[in-house]
Image: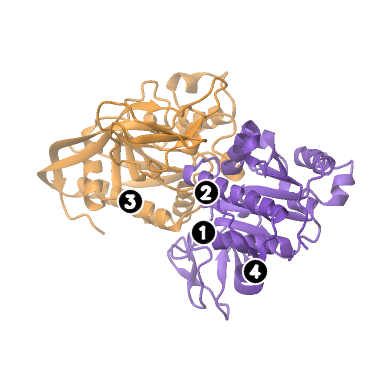
Chain colours: A orange, B purple
Amino acid sequence: MVASIQRVALVGGVHGGELTGVFLAKKFQQFPLQIQRNGVETVSLLANKKAIAMGRRYIDTDLNRAFNPQDLENPQLMNHEQSIAKTIARRIQEEKIDLIIDLHSTTANMGLTIILCTSDPYLLRLAAYLTEINPKVKVLRYPPNQNASYLRSLVKFGFAIEVGAVANGLLDAKLFQETEDLIHAILDYIEALKQGQPSVTEANLTSYRILEKVDYPRNKYGEIEAMIHPQLQFQDYKPLHPGNPMFITFDGKDIFYEGESTVYPVFINEVAYYEKGIAMYLTQKEKCGFETFTQSLRR
Amino acid sequence: MVASIQRVALVGGVHGGELTGVFLAKKFQQFPLQIQRNGVETVSLLANKKAIAMGRRYIDTDLNRAFNPQDLENPQLMNHEQSIAKTIARRIQEEKIDLIIDLHSTTANMGLTIILCTSDPYLLRLAAYLTEINPKVKVLRYPPNQNASYLRSLVKFGFAIEVGAVANGLLDAKLFQETEDLIHAILDYIEALKQGQPSVTEANLTSYRILEKVDYPRNKYGEIEAMIHPQLQFQDYKPLHPGNPMFITFDGKDIFYEGESTVYPVFINEVAYYEKGIAMYLTQKEKCGFETFTQSLRR
C-alpha cells in the first residue's frame, strides 16, 4: 500500500530567474548529506544553467513544456530547452528516479503551494500532511497534464512547489528558508513512511482545483487594457465573490467578476503568464477526507 | 529666481521590464491633454521599445549609463542602447526640453522616490513640496553624475522617479495610480510657479544622501554567499544601527552591520544590481531648511 520511494530528484532552475529553487539546488549540491534519509537517496539538479546565468525564464522556449515523450524522441526538436529536456529526461531515467520535486517561484502571492496533476493517494496524503504541519502550505490541483509536457510528468510521483510572492531574479531569505524547511518535511515524511508502521487515521485535505483561466482585458492588437484590481492583487486563495472587482482600467474604471459562484483565484498577476494570456486561474475550494497516516515526523 | 520651465519630457521604459513607467508613458501618449498645463508643454516618450517588447532591462547594455556626451558623439558606439541614446538625446535637444522626468521601478521597497543628482534649488523645492503633500514620497540624493551618463543628465532640470517594491514585468495598479498622481502634482507645481506669485516661506526637506554601496558577501568565484537578512528585506529608508543583521548565509548564519553610526539603507535587494555588485546603498538622513513657496496646488 505504501509506495516504495527510493530515489528522489530535487530540481531547481527549470526557469532561470526563479532563484529560490536555484540556490536551494546549489546548496544541496554542496551539502548532499542534508537531503539524504535512511533508504531514500536524493539528487539535486540545476535544470537550465544557461537561463540561470542569463537571469531569464528560458532561452528559446519554456523548458517546463518540453517533456512530452514524443517531443523527447523527436530529433528535429533541438532548440536550447528541447535539447536539455532530452538530457534531463535521460538522467531521470538512468538514475531510476521515483519522485521529482520541481522547485518554482512566482510573483503571485502563492505562499508555499504544492501543485499536483494527479489524484495519486500517496501524493495526496503527503500534501495533507504538509498542510497540517504548516498552514502556509496550499494544495493546488491541476487537470491531468494530458501531453505530459511538464518535468514532473517524467515519473509517477512528481509535483511542483511554487513559492511566492517574489520577483524574478530576487533571493528572498525568508522564502528560501521556508522552502528549505518544506523540502526537509517532505523527505522526512518519505523516510518515515518507509521506515515505520504509521498508524492510519482520517484526515481532511483542503485543496483548490483549477476551473478556468482568465486573461487580462485586451484591445484588438492584443495589448492589455486593464490591470489586476488593487483589491485583488496578492489575494491568491482568497474568495472572489460575484460582483467583486477584478481589473481596473488605466483610466480607473473597475471591471467586476461576473461569474455566478464564489471562486478562489490563484497565480494572480504572475509575470510569466502575461505572454500566455493568463491574468489568473479561478479555482474551487474542495475538502476531501481520506485515510492517512499519523506519526511524529517533526525534526 | 523662478526657473522658466516650458517643455517637459516624461520618459518611460528606459529599462524594459519596469512597466509602471512604460504604461504611464503609453497612457499619456494616448491622452496627451492630461499632461498639458498652462505655459508648460509635456511630451511622453517610450525610451527602449525593443527591451520593452522583450520584457528585459536592456538588450546590450544599460541605457541609463549611455548618455555621456563623448559617447553620444562617438560613431563607434553603436550597440542597441548606444544607438537609441543618440536618437533620444537628439530629440531632447531638438524639442528644447527643459526638464526630464525619468520613470523607473524597483524590486526594493522605495515607495515613491525622487532621485536628485544636483543641488539645484528649483528641484529641491519641488522635492520638498512633494514630500509635504505625500508622506510616501522620499528624496534620495545621489552624488553628481560626473560623466553625465544618465538620461536625466541631458538637461539642467532632470530627475528620476523610482517606485517600488514591484517585480519587473509586473503592472501594479496601486503603484501605477500613485505614480500618476505624483506626475500630476509635479506638473501642477511647475504650472503654479510659472503662473502665480507664490509666497515664500521656510520649509524643511528631509532627504537621504548616498554614502556608499555594499555588495553581497561573495566567494572567490564572485558567487553570492549570503542573502539580504529577513529583518532588512523591504526595510528601505529605515534606520540600520551598528550590530543589526544585514545578511544571512545559506546556512542561516547572521552577518551584522559593523559600521560606527546609524545609516538608512536603500535599494535593498534590487534585482538589477546583483550584476553591478550592489546589495544596497547606505545613506545618511539629512534635514535642510530653506526658503520655498506656498500656494494651494492640490487639484
* Crowd band around label 3 with a 10 angstrom C-alpha radius: few (<14), some (14–19), many (20+): some
Residue B56 shows in the view: no
Mark 3 vs mark 4, CA separation in Å: 41 Å
* Crowd band around label 2 with a 10 angstrom C-alpha radius: few (<14), some (14–19), many (20+): some
Mark 2 vs mark 1, CA separation in Å: 9 Å
- Mark 3 belongs to which subunit? A
> Mark 4 vs mark 2: which is more N-terminal?
2
Q: Which residue is mark 2?
A: B178
Query: Residue A282: horizontal and vertical position, in percent?
Result: 33, 31
Q: Disc 2 or disc 3, which is closer to the eye? A: 2
Badge 3 marks a residue whose secondary structure is helix
Q: Amino acid at mark 4?
A: Arg
- Mark 1 belongs to which subunit? B
> Mark 4 vs mark 1: which is more N-terminal?
1
Q: Which residue is mark 3?
A: A182
Mark 1 vs mark 3, CA separation in Å: 36 Å
Q: Disc 4 or disc 1, which is closer to the eye? A: 1
> Mark 2 vs mark 1: which is more N-terminal?
1
Q: Which residue is mark 1?
A: B136
Left or right for A164, reference B147:
left
* Crowd band around label 4 with a 10 angstrom C-alpha radius: few (<14), some (14–19), many (20+): many
Query: Residue B124: horizontal and vertical position, in percent?
Result: 68, 64
